[in-house]
Image (cartoon, rainbow, N blue to C red):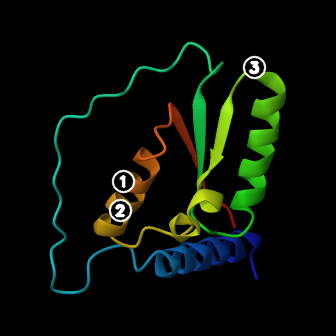
């Protein structure tokens, strides 16, 4: 079999698998997804993380917690007075993939109660 053809088949298979893992890539047949868009305003970036609270958000996928734990170690070593909050330790129920906008909003509200200056999220496989 031609290498290009084989590579194309592998890419197509991976794309199909990733779509099915993400719930099919859209709304169920016959339903139109409800989308609400509005103006987006970015928060200003802090000049420094010294004395700031950094919240780490993990979605429960394999090894995301390991990556974020390493980020926490590096921040603690390199930034004076930084406070690290590992959300999955504070509230294990937040270590999930947000399957709906309602779940996402619930997790966001829980994160907001920690009053972070910055949120770093990770998803890994």
Cβ atoms under marks 2 and 1 closer than 8 Å: yes
Disc 1 residue crowd, few under 14, some 14–19, many 20+, Cα 10 Å? few
Q: Could you say where residue 63 lies in the image, as x and y percent from the top left?
A: 75, 64
Quadrant for the C terminus, please: bottom right
Give the class, few, some or many, for how many residues have Cα within 10 Å of label 2's Cα (few <14, many ≥20). Answer: few
The relative height of residue 19 versus residue 107 in the rendered view (above or below) is below
Say which of 25 and 56 sits in front. 56
- Where is residue 82? Give x, y as percent: 68, 28
- For marks 3 and 1 on the same chain, the one whose residue lies earlier in the sequence: 3
3D distance between C-alphas at marks 2 and 1: 5 Å
**Residue drawn 67% across and 39% down?**
84
Residue topped by disc 2: 106
- Tell me the CA gap for discs 2 and 3: 32 Å
Q: Residue at x 74, y 76 (%)?
A: 2
Label 2 with label 3: CB-CB less than 8 Å: no
Using the rendered view, name the quadrant where residue 66 is placed: bottom right
Q: Residue 92: give x, y in percent of width and height.
A: 59, 68
Q: Which mark is residue 80?
A: 3
* Residue denoted by label 1: 109
Residue furthest bottom in the image: 29
Q: Secondary structure at mark 2?
A: helix
Q: Nearer the viewer, residue 25 or 86?
A: 86
Residue in front for this viewpoint, 15 or 107: 107
Assign a secondary structure to mark 1: helix
Is 54 left or right of 32, judged from the image as shown? right
The quarter of the picture where the N terminus appears is bottom right
66 or 83, which lies in front? 83
């Amino acid at each position: 079999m031609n290498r290009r053809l084989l590579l194309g088949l592998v890419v197509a298979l991976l794309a199909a698998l990733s779509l099915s893992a993400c719930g099919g890539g859209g709304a169920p047949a016959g339903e139109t997804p409800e989308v609400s868009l509005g103006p987006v305003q970015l928060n200003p970036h802090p000049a420094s993380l010294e004395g700031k609270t950094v919240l780490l958000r993990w979605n429960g996928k394999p090894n995301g917690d390991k990556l974020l734990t390493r980020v926490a170690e590096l921040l603690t070593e390199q930034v004076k007075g930084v406070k690290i909050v590992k959300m999955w330790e504070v509230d294990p129920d937040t270590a999930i993939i947000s399957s709906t906008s309602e779940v996402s909003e619930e997790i966001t509200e829980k994160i907001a109660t920690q009053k972070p200056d910055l949120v770093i999220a990770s998803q890994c496989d």
